[in-house]
Image (spheres, helix red, strand yellow):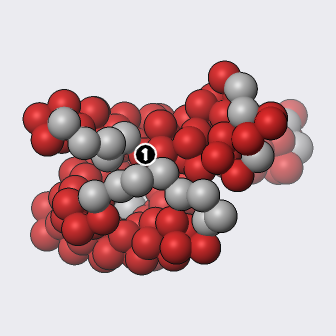
Amino acid sequence: MIVSYLVPESIVTLINMTKSATEKINSNLISTSALTLYSYIQSGLDKKEFREPVILGKLIAYAIPRRATKYSQVAGWFIHYLAGQIIIEAYDKLLNDKRRPVVTGLLAGGVTGVIAALVWRTVLKIHPNPPDIDQPNFTRYLIIGHIIFGLAALKTLGPAKQ
């Protein structure tokens, strides 16, 4: 092919990698936003704080109270979407089912939800001044929210690469 003579292979590889990275970033934005929308809806219905970015911002602000500013909320949102990107990368590497059926999304989301609940429980336990959270309902919510994340992620990631 004439392109292979004109364009170094490393450039072609970088272009292909960028496309894959773009797909994964888009998947993260959609999946994490779906989970976050659920957390906002659930918080409003239950009149309790289940919004992860807000809780993350509070954790940051409460850990360094003299430095607590609007940036703690920005950091909370950044950490929230960064965690989503890490999960998307793991899903893309670990889930090799060529069809990526709904059952895979349900299972992946459920497992991720249980892991997220354990991580949140640990963070809230070791934090010097954690915000007050209804832990049992937050745990239930996290599992449901991550199932939504898992379904959205596997739908937006598309079929596994051959």
Residue sitting at x 51%, y 66%: 124
**Against 22, is 95 above or below?**
below
**Against 120, is 32 above or below?**
above
Q: How many marks?
A: 1
Q: Nearer the viewer, residue 72 or 149?
A: 72
Query: Where's residue 104, x and y in %?
Result: 22, 70
Query: Where's residue 90, x and y in %?
Result: 51, 67
Query: Where's residue 146, x and y in %?
Result: 29, 58
Q: Secondary structure at mark 1?
A: helix
Q: Nearer the viewer, residue 147 or 136?
A: 136
Residue 36 found in image quarter? top left
Q: Mark 1 sits on what residue?
A: 52
Residue sitting at x 76%, y 46%: 64
The image quadrant where one finds the N terminus is: top right
- Relative to 97, 8 lies left or right: right
Residue sitting at x 60%, y 73%: 126
Local packing at callout 1 (Cα closer than 10 Å; few below 14, some 14-19, many 20+) is many
Residue sitting at x 37%, y 70%: 117
- Relative to 22, 53 lies left or right: left
Q: Nearer the viewer, residue 55 or 88?
A: 55
